[in-house]
Image (cartoon, rainbow, N blue to C red):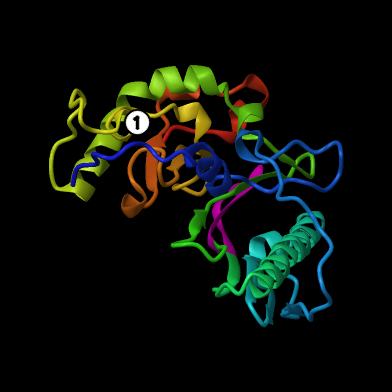
Amino acid sequence: MRARRQKPLFLTFVAVTALSACSGGHPDEEPTANGMTSNRAAPAPNAALANDTAPIDKPQKLSAKVDGFEFEYQWPGEAAAIPALDSWLRGNGESLRKSNQSDAMAAKAEAKKDAFVFNGYSYQEDYTAAANTPRFLVLISDGYVYTGGAHGMPINTAILWDKASGKRLATSTLIDLPRFAAAARKRFCDALDKQREEKRGEPVRHDDPNDIVDFNSCVDLTKQLVVPISHGGRALDTVQVIIGPYEAGPYSEGRYVIDLPLDAGLLATVKPAYRDAFAPAD
C-alpha cells in the first residue's frame, strides 16, 4: 500500500493532538513524558459525572453521557492506591470531561443554528500500568476522541510517577533524549521500517519521488511519545516509542509502537540520578 497524495495540511495539528499527555496538578510537578501539555479546561453545562465507587486499590472510572456527548476515563488500581496520583487523575478526568463536553455542546448548538447534522462527540481514555517497580509507576493511556468529522483520532498519553518524590516526571528528566535517539537510531529506524513493511505488504521505498517523504523516512524519535517501561518487573528495562497516525504513515496504518530493550549503550544515556531505577533487559 503506497501513499501518493500530498501530505495533509493539518498534519502537525493532528500529531500534537494525538500524542498530547495531560499535565496539571501542583506547580512544582514536571509535565508528563516529553513535556506534553494538558487539554484546556472550559466551563460545561450541568451533567451527571458517574464515578464508580470501587475500593481505592481497584480500577477507577469516570463516565458521563448526555445527548450528543459520551465520556469515559479510567485508571488502574495501582494508580488509585497512591492518594496524590489518584487525586490528580480524578481531577484531570473531570477537567477533560468539562472541556470536551463544552466543545460538544457548542458544536451541537452551531449545527442546529446552521441546519447541519450533528454527529456527536466522544472521548475515551484508559490508563494501564506499563511499569510498577520499586521506584516508578508508569502509566500509558490508550484512547480515542471523536469530534464529528470523518473519523476520530487515537489518544496515547503517559505518566511517570516517581514514588520517591511523590510527583510526575518527564521522560527527559530521566533520560538524555538526544543522546538516546542517536544511540538507538539504527535499531529504531529498522524496527519502524519492518513494521511498515508488515502493514503495507511491500518494502519501504525510501527514494520514490512519488511517495510522501515522511511516510517512508525515519521519524524524529525525540518528537514522539517516549516512555520507559518494564517487562521484567524489577526495573525500567525498555523504552517504548509510540508514533501516532500521519507521523510515519497514513491514517489507515494507525499508530506504530516500537520497544527498545535497554543494553549498555542505551543505559549510558540515563541520567545519573535515576540510573539505579534502570536495568538491562533480560
Residue 95 locus on image (x, y percent): 78, 60
Membership of 37 in magenta stretch: no
**Is residue 175 visible from the viewing direction of this image?**
yes
x, y percent for residue 66 = 69, 81
The residue at which mark 1 appears reads as 214
Residue at screen point 57% across, 63% down: 147
- Residue 146 lies left or right of residue 45; in this view the side is left
Residue placed most toward the observer, 244 or 122: 122
Q: Does the image show residue 269?
A: no
- Residue 243 sits in quarter: top left
Q: Is residue 141 above or below residue 182?
A: below
Answer above or below: position of 220 versus 31.
Answer: above
Q: Position of residue 252 (x, y in %)?
A: 32, 54
Q: Which residues are magenta?
A: 125-145
Position of 240 relative to 43 (above/below): above
Quarter occupied by residue 112:
bottom right
Q: In terms of depth relative to the viewer, which is nearer, 257 or 201?
A: 201
Residue 101 is left or right of residue 123, and the answer is right
Is 33 above or below relative to 143? Answer: above
Residue at the front extreme? 114
Residue 23 image point, x, y percent: 73, 45
Residue drawn at (33%, 46%) of the image: 250
Q: Magenta stretch: residue 134 in it?
A: yes
Pick the quarter of the image with the C terminus. top left
Label the magenta part by its dominant secondary structure.
strand
